[in-house]
Amino acid sequence: MAAPLRIQSDWAQALRKDEGEAWLSCHPPGKPSLYGSLTSQGIGLDGIPEVTASEGFIVNEINKKSIHISCPKENTSSKFLAPYTTFSRIHTKSITCLDISSGGGLGVSSSSDGSMKIWQASNGELRRGLEGHVFDVNCCRFFPSGLVVLSGGMDAQLKIWSAEDASCVVTFKGHKGGILDTAIVDRGRNVVSGSRDGTARLWDCGRSACLGVIADCGSSINGVAVGAADNSINLGSPEQTPSEREVGTEAKMLLLAREDKKLQCLGLQSRQPVFLFIGSDAFNCCTFLSGFLLLAGTQDGNIYQLDVRSPTVPIQVIHRSGAPVLSLLSFRDGFIASQGDGSCFIIQQDLDYVIELTEADCDPVYKVATWEKQIYTCCRDGLVRRYQLSDL
């Protein structure tokens, strides 16, 4: 893995000032870090600053919202992207989760101020508050239709809401600890939840009933993901005939990111184990990249890429800093990761540089959501940031 480059969080504003400066650094693993700076020579006629880098760094390209920097000595290169716009009025405190609807029109987010809100994705304008959870809401996401929201809270309740009138249409009860993550199966007739009580449960939305405890692992389940399995993967057979209320669970894998340093994969319908992988620290989040590839992130900053068909040895372990990996999202032919030190980056197979989403200054970026070329992040500093990938 190439040595990570870092940049001053407000570089875009700093370099718009005449003779403005921003610091840069490169952190090769096991070697001393390299430090440098960028200096603005003034703004060109096109409104773009003319920027030079100190010794050891090169400015390959600069636009209004992005700057591409290389460090030839370490053969590493990053494109830093500043937000296109920032929404500061949605919440007053740390934003713990967010999602964007399938049509790109609405956002939903939850905050440590106890609120959960629906807002217009284009401008951050508030539309509705979703009120009904006791204590904090940990996770929220849209159903594929984009008209309905699923949320899980510290009150051990899972709720389904109408995004149109903010009514809570279903409440699922059964967990004995806070719900930390959810996943939607296919179009959403069934959903999965993972909880601090150590269980993952499958629910029937139409009858607001629990269809079963899929896993009971005795350790907090921090992240869950559901993915369609490649047909070369043996998911086993269910011991009992599945309920006819189970819809879309066949040929699906369930992935659990656990607090006890274990990453567990099982057949969603069969409930049979597929693999158990032990990592370096607690697993915080996980996602499928394909029918057999997956990613999982740990509290000590490791991102494991595994192949379900031979999961004993990772394909690769990406480590860019020791900060907790807080979210992972499959994106185009790569992924987006966010960490507890404010870093949020995109790795794509066909790019020889990393894209870094900047501006969060050492505040954890808890969650990332995308819609087409737009990327939304939520952060402990109480801001939702929207990045425009066309700005690259």
Image: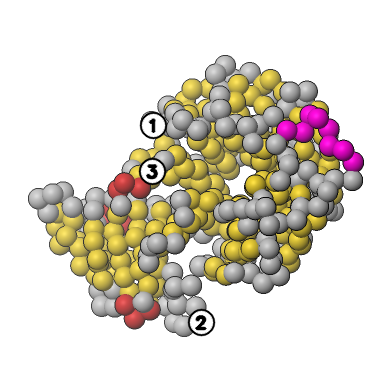
The secondary element bearing badge 1 is classed as: loop
Seen in the picture, residue 41 relative to 56 is either above or below; the reply is above
| Residue 100 locus on image (x, y percent) | 50, 35
Q: Is residue 50 left or right of residue 380?
A: left
Return the residue nearer the eye: 373 or 25: 373
Name the residue at 45% across, 77% down.
28
- For image coordinates 34% across by 60% down, the residue present is 79
N-terminal of the two: label 2 or label 1? 2
Binning the other alpha carbons within 10 Å of mark 1 as few (below 14), some (14 to 19) or many (20 upward) gives: few
Query: Does residue 244 belong to the magenta stretch?
Result: yes
Chain part drawn in magenta: 240-247
Determine the CA span between mark 2 and mark 1.
43 Å
Report the mark closest to the observer, 1 or 3: 3
Q: Position of residue 95 (x, y in %)?
A: 54, 41
- Residue found at x 76% / y 61%: 275
Amino acid type of the residue that numbered disc 3 sits on in the rendered structure: Lys
Amino acid marked by disc 1: Ser
> Measured along the vertical axis of the image, is residue 53 above or below residue 283?
below
Residue type beneath disc 2: Gly
| Residue highlighted by disc 3 | 373
Looking at the image, is mark 2 or mark 3 nearer the viewer? Answer: 3
Q: Are marks 2 and 3 in contact (CB under 8 Å)?
A: no
Query: Which residue: 9% across, 50% down?
Result: 45
Residue at the far top: name it.
Answer: 165
